[in-house]
Amino acid sequence: MDKLVIEGGRPLSGSIAIQGAKNAALPILAASMLVEGKVTIDQVPRLLDIEVMLNILRDLGCRAEHENQTVTLDTSGASSSHIPETLMRQMRSSIFLMGPLLARYGEVTIYQPGGCAIGERKIDLHLQGLIALGAEIVEEGSRIVCYAKRLKGADVHLDFPSVGATENIMMAAVLADGVTTITNAAREPEIQDLQRFLNAMGAKVIGAGTDTITVEGVDKLTPCRYTVIPDRIVTGTIMVAAAATKGSVTLRNTYPAHLTSLIHVLRRAGVQIEVDGDIIRVGSASRPRSIDRVVTSPYPAFPTDLQSQVMVLLALADGVSVMKETIFEGRFKHVDELARMGADIRVDLNAAIIRGVPRLYGATVEATDLRAGAALVIAGLAAQGKTVVEQIHHIDRGYDGIETMLQQLGARITRAKAIANNPVLPKAVRSLNE
Ligand SMILES: CC(=O)N[C@H]1[C@@H](OP(=O)(O)OP(=O)(O)OC[C@H]2O[C@@H](n3ccc(=O)[nH]c3=O)[C@H](O)[C@@H]2O)O[C@H](CO)[C@@H](O)[C@@H]1O
Ligand SMILES: C=C(OP(=O)(O)O)C(=O)O
């Protein structure tokens, strides 16, 4: 397994451009299955999850290439509506194919999806939405078979504004007979991006970004070329890293309006932030201030995907802060790892009580999930001494070359390649390390 090795204590400085959004690209790639022909998607980051999605699409019979940041996909050879369990289990986002495949073939066989261990992450809202559109669903162990000769538009109310369920239902409804209305829909920017992509192919979707989305079914879509939005969570991660290292960083290719809640929290912590079109400048010279309460909630409130990163900043703040996690019940796994670096954080049910310390110290720590891993990288950059972050395949799910990005900002961070992958070593030595 690769590791990241960080020599901490250097302020980040300089300028970088932000990658395209993982959470927009994944449903958009899945939605491409709704159309027959060649689809081109630009600004697609090179990530493990994207690779898994492209492998699933290839397994379904598509041709898929990812060169630089552009994916070209030809869905015309696709014929399968069955996703093998081994592929389904490689990430949560495999579930996005359920709606599009059902709409295209009238049937789909999938399995319970995999993904980071941050909570139970049921798929009941996805299934309820498809049942409302007329699907019949048979569950046998982890296997799920859905049938619907032709889906029918319906009113779907979500008990919780689930991002994935909103997207799956939108995608299924695009080729349904009649009108579908989703109420208590999630409002995340990635849902607006999916709406723009679907409409670029000829769908009739309105309302994304509000809590009511209306989809008027159409008979057929036409292929298109589309550019994914910038990744707001990667943007936020670098903003926090700049603040935690008392650095000064300019971020290009951002969408600041998607980060209003983070900007508000960082300003409360005393971080200087300037917004100028698609550029965000972040600077901080002094110790952060504590914040009495940060609560994660669905967009536009503070995102769960930035909770662990901001916790690192607050771990270095002057005073006591409280962060409450309301989306995922298992998203405090970074706390034990941060404690190894000298952080003083106590977890009480879904609240973390963070007593700021003047400094963190380098240690060997383990990324337990994607954003926990990003938080440990920030902690390593801010800490005194050397930090080694292990299990970084989690980080590679969401950050396109995190070390290269941070090196551009002056960080001393390198990727130590696993010996097992090192072709220079004799095979016998490599196999000892596998
Ligand atoms: C690829 C992608 O876009 N991932 C994002 C998406 O995940 P994802 O779409 O999985 O997140 P959801 O909004 O669906 O999940 C939020 C909460 O609802 C629960 N739930 C969800 C669906 C369901 O059928 N039943 C159910 O109980 C989940 O367990 C969780 O507690 O939104 C999350 C919340 O902003 C982000 O952290 C993820 O980065
Ligand atoms: C939880 C995340 O993603 P996913 O839904 O793909 O697991 C994330 O991006 O932080």
Image: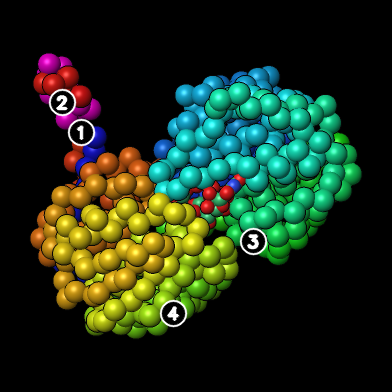
- Name the residue type under label 4: Glu
Identify the image quadrant of the C terminus: top left
Identify the image quadrant of the N terminus: top left
Marks 3/2: CA–CA distance: 46 Å
Q: Circle 4 is placed at which residue position?
A: 274
Counting other residues with Cα less than 10 Å from the Cα at mark 4, is it few (<14), some (14-19), or many (20 or more)? few
**Residue 363 lies in quadrant:** bottom left
Marks 1/4: CA–CA distance: 40 Å
Q: Secondary structure at mark 1?
A: loop
The residues colored magenta run 418-428
- The percent position of residue 324, horizontal first and vertical second, equals 42, 67
Q: Circle 3 is placed at which residue position?
A: 187
Mark closer to the observer (2, 1): 2
Counting other residues with Cα less than 10 Å from the Cα at mark 2, is it few (<14), some (14-19), or many (20 or more)? few
267 or 289: which is nearer to us?
289
263 or 70: which is nearer to us?
263
Q: Secondary structure at mark 2?
A: loop
- Name the residue type under label 2: Asn
**Is mark 3 in CB contact (under 8 Å) with mark 4?**
no
Q: Earlier in the sequence, mark 1 or mark 4?
A: 4
- Which residue ends up furthest to the front in the rendered image? 349
**Is mark 2 in CB contact (under 8 Å) with mark 1?**
yes
